[in-house]
Image (tube, rainbow, N blue to C red):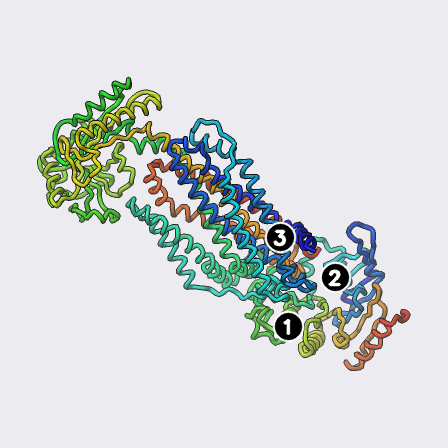
């Protein structure tokens, strides 16, 4: 007896293969991707990579994103299929099958689909796992043979996540038949629809959301704000897109319809009314396509450009091969003795110093009030603070290779020169209540200052006439026990291979740790600042070679995830488009039949379908491109935070991503319009 | 002068993989004069729908000619057929065939829009027709907002607005209640009296009894025809009923 149900379920899936095949295939792909992410995460080989922690964090993020999207996506597809099959189920009901029989068939169908999908996905995941890992190793520049490996916990997690998912779809499908009467099932989707009302409030809300998001994206310059507001902007854009597609499009189409000469034209008549009719049911689908497209574009272009520019980023983050950072509680003249230790260590390692520089300056974060820069409380860092670097002429020349003695004039007593990321136009500048005449002012971007890449909107180097003036300012800044940084930076470029450089850096680090120990730094109880010689409060070093691997694993991991998720989102987008076209095809079939009977020729049907599909298709991608364009300033600032200052590279990556995406989109458009036309076209003859 | 002439019409359907052949129309000959109101009656399977599809240029006959105003429908080029159909023929269907996404007004305008008529001209043409059909108040409504009778009136308006030489009606009363049927048939008579030629395919004796002439089709041939002459609708009804009885009980062909 059970056999009959199983047979029926099998036949049903086979007969509806046009609907089920894409559903199962995309399900298999999703499961495979989920497994692959877990596989990378659980692979013991990964621990050998420098920065494995970064990589694991990134992959864990990927697992979460894929899980969430597979739920949304598979649910969407399932509800679509179940809607399409209402009529069929209604016929079973009328033929005398009780609801519990139908439920049995549906349950078996879901089990079949789930088993095929999950097992197929796991098989595909296992087959491709080695290849993917090899790819990842190649990206990370990690030289290691890849072992074939099956992750048991990965399989278990996949079974659980997707098992629950398919149980949920089954519950949804059963609810559909429990609450429906047979006659309703028979009628299926063919219920008279009301013309959509113009929802002005929603349209305005959508426009406001998007305008706000665009405003945030374009105007936010403070790096800390960029970080926090980015997600606000993303959420606003998503909400705004949904609102605008739902309400705004209807408002626009109604306006078009009220223009009689435009509307009563063969080319626009059916397209406008068809879209008006369709917008209501498909606004959400179109908005999803738009949001997903935007995500793909942003994610792929940023991760690709970050990876492509990894050398630049490394150089921006670590201006010199070995850089020593110290802070002092005291302004002093002459050099810090530790530099001798560093140089000695480098020499002992057999390396030669090719370029070195050493300079000190006073770093202040101040609130700008016209020409006056005042102290700001520590917790107000995310308000727009200016970065003021008080520096002497000699130190400035030492800091930047581009400057020689002739470039920088010595300021007169009581006068300062202001070199800023922005031109400083006023004649005077008041720093912490002390007023100076501004002798010279020019626009200047520091090349070695790693804070510069953070993109603080106001970053000024104030060149003072003497160290005494600097001391005075330091005293002013220190009055109420604020932590002020008199910073010393010593940088060294050395020769050798990456491994040699890294070994040298390790030795230098050891030497510095020893020196710190001696100076009484690095104590566990850091409550009381222990000042060493010259009031030294902290000292640490950074090495470019030592961090290169970590850098590669971070940016390479992000690149891998970006492309991986890009493919996943693209697949979801394609599936939504496909199912949308098919479902619209069935809805439109009848209408085109009528139009052909009334006297519309096949040619006219074709052009009408084309113009309608084209508009519906390109609306989301054009909107996505606009979103990306508006997000551009904010994303390039975010990339600056991640040390990618090469905006040109990002623009190139973005354009290439958009072109490739549009190409794929176009192919999907062609394929689905063909299957749409197959359903709709040639009704009469 | 005859507006429609049908000569030796044959239609043979072949099942998809060859094999079985079904002869839907054997040898149909008849003509319709300008201003006539002709009903075509027949059992299910008698071939009347096939006939109507051929008259409507929706289907091609296997052999034979259909002349509309002297122009042979069979030889109209594939490309021009749709334009020809909407310019010369008007259609009224059993299930109305109104589009849900258009208001009644836009449904009526559809053939004109396809022919590229200017909006002003369309409004001018619509006014008298809407008045005559009593749907002026409903023009902005959507098909799902009005009754079946009202839908059919809109469909009639759509058929008439192109000023066709011939209106083809396929079971126009099939989906209407008796009251709506009465008023639609009255409307057809009124339109016909104003000079519109109508060919109506129907099952309904009542509907046919309103026509000037009734053609009976059986097994793909014109079996018999009745002229109204001076008969009232009731007398016509009785006569049609008798003929149908003969038809179904299998009388010999006579004319």
Q: Are marks 2 and 3 in contact (CB under 8 Å)?
A: no
Q: Are marks 1 and 3 on the same chain?
A: no
Q: Could you tell me if residue B92 is visible in this image?
A: no
Q: Which comes sooner in the sequence, label 2 or label 1?
A: 2
Quadrant position of the N terminus of chain A in the picture? bottom right
Of badges 2 and 1, the one in the foreground is 1
Q: Could you tell me if residue A403 is visible in this image?
A: yes
* Distance Cα–Cα, label 2 vs label 1: 23 Å
Total numbered badges shown on the rendered structure: 3
Q: Which residue is mark 2?
A: B53
Q: Secondary structure at mark 3?
A: helix
Image location (x, y in percent) of residue A160:
51, 48
Chain letter of disc 1?
Answer: B
Q: Secondary structure at mark 1?
A: helix
* Distance Cα–Cα, label 1 vs label 3: 41 Å
Q: Is residue A338 above or below residue B239?
A: above
Chain letter of disc 3?
Answer: A
Question: How crowded is the residue under tag 1: few (<14 C-alpha within 10 Å), some, or many (20+)?
Answer: some
Of badges 2 and 3, the one in the foreground is 3
Foreground residue among A390 and A553: A553
Q: Which residue is mark 1?
A: B148
Q: Which residue is mark 3?
A: A109
Q: Are marks 1 and 3 in contact (CB under 8 Å)?
A: no
* The label number, if any, that marks residue A421 in the structure image: none
């Amino acid at each position: 007896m059970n056999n009959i149900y199983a047979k029926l379920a099998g036949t049903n899936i086979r007969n509806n293969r046009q609907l089920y095949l894409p559903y199962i295939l995309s399900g298999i792909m999703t499961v495979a991707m989920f497994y692959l992410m877990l596989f990378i995460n659980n692979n013991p080989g990964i621990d050998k990579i420098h920065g494995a922690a970064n990589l694991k964090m990134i992959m864990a993020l990927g697992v979460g994103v894929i899980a969430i999207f597979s739920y949304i996506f598979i649910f969407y597809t399932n509800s679509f299929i179940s809607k399409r099959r209402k009529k069929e189920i209604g016929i079973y009901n009328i033929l005398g099958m009780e609801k519990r029989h139908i439920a049995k068939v549906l349950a078996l169908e879901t089990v079949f689909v789930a088993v095929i999908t999950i097992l197929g996905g796991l098989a595909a995941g296992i087959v491709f796992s080695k290849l993917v890992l090899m790819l990842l190793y190649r990206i990370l520049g990690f030289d290691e043979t890849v072992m074939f490996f099956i992750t048991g916990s990965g399989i278990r997690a996949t079974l659980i996540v997707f098992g629950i998912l398919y149980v949920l779809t089954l519950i949804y499908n059963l609810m559909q038949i429990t609450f429906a009467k047979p006659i309703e099932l028979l009628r299926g989707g063919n219920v008279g629809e009301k013309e959509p009302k113009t929802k002005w409030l929603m349209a305005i809300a959508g426009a406001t959301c998007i305008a706000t998001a665009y405003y945030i994206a374009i105007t936010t310059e403070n790096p800390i704000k960029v970080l926090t507001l980015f997600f606000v902007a993303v959420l606003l854009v998503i909400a705004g897109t949904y609102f605008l597609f739902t309400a705004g499009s209807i408002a626009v189409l109604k306006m078009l319809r009220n223009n009689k000469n435009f509307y009563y034209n063969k080319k626009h008549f059916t397209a406008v009314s068809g879209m008006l009719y369709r917008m209501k049911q498909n606004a959400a689908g179109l908005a999803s396509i738009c949001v997903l497209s935007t995500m793909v574009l942003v994610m792929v272009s940023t991760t690709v450009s970050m990876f492509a520019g990894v050398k630049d980023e490394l150089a921006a983050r670590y201006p010199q091969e070995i850089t020593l950072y110290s802070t002092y509680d005291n302004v002093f003249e002459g050099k810090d003795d530790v530099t001798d230790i560093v140089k000695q260590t480098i020499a002992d390692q057999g390396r030669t110093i090719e370029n070195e520089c050493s300079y000190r300056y006073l770093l202040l974060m101040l609130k700008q009030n016209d020409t006056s820069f005042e102290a700001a409380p520590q917790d107000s860092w995310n308000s727009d603070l200016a970065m003021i670097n008080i520096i002497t002429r000699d130190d400035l020349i030492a800091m930047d290779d581009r400057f020689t003695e002739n470039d920088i004039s010595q300021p007169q007593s009581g006068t300062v020169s202001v070199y800023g990321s922005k031109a400083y136009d006023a004649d005077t500048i008041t720093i912490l209540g002390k007023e100076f005449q501004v002798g010279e002012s020019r626009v200047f971007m520091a090349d070695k200052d790693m804070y510069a890449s953070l993109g603080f909107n106001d970053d000024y180097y104030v060149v003072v006439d003497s160290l005494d003036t600097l001391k005075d300012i330091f005293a002013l800044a220190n009055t109420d026990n604020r932590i002020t940084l008199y910073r010393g930076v010593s940088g060294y470029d050395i020769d050798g291979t990456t491994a040699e450089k890294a070994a040298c850096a390790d030795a230098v680090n050891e030497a510095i740790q020893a020196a710190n120990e001696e100076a009484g730094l690095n104590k566990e109880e850091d409550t009381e600042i222990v000042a060493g010689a010259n009031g030294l409060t902290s000292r640490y070093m950074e090495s470019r070679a030592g961090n290169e691997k970590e850098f590669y694993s971070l940016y390479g991991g992000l690149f891998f995830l970006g492309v991986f998720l890009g493919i996943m989102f693209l697949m979801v987008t394609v599936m939504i488009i496909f199912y949308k076209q098919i479902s619209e095809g069935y809805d439109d079939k009848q209408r085109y039949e009528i139009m052909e009977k009334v006297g519309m020729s096949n040619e006219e049907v074709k052009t009408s379908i084309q113009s309608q599909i084209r508009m519906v298709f390109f609306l989301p991608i054009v909107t996505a491109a606009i979103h990306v364009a508006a997000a551009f300033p904010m994303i390039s600032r975010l990339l600056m935070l991640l040390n990618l200052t090469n905006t040109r590279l990002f623009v190139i990556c973005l354009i290439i991503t958009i072109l490739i995406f549009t190409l794929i989109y176009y192919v999907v458009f062609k394929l689905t319009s063909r299957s749409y036309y197959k359903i709709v076209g040639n009704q009469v003859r | 002068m005859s507006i429609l002439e049908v000569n030796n019409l044959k239609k043979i359907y072949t099942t998809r993989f060859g094999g079985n052949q079904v002869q839907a129309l054997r040898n149909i000959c008849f003509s319709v004069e300008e201003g006539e109101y002709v009903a075509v009656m027949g059992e299910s399977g008698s071939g009347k729908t096939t006939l109507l599809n051929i008259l409507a240029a929706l289907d091609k006959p296997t052999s034979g000619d259909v002349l509309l105003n002297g122009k042979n429908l069979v030889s109209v080029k594939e490309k021009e057929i749709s334009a020809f159909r909407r310019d010369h023929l008007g259609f009224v269907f059993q299930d109305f065939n109104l589009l849900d996404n258009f208001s009644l007004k836009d449904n009526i305008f559809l053939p004109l829009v396809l022919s590229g008529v200017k909006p002003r001209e369309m409004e001018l043409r619509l006014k008298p027709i809407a008045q005559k059909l009593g749907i002026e108040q409903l023009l902005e409504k959507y098909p799902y907002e009005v009754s079946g009778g009202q839908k059919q009136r809109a469909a009639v308006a759509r058929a008439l607005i192109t000023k066709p030489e011939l209106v083809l009606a396929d079971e126009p009363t099939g989906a209407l209640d008796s009251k709506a049927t009465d008023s639609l048939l009255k409307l057809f008579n009124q339109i016909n009296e104003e000079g519109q030629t109508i060919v109506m395919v129907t099952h309904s004796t009542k509907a046919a009894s309103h026509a000037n002439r009734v053609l009976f089709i059986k097994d793909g041939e014109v079996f018999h025809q009745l002229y109204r002459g001076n008969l009232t609708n009731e007398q016509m009804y009785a006569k049609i009923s008798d003929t149908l009885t003969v038809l179904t009980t299998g009388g010999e062909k006579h004319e």
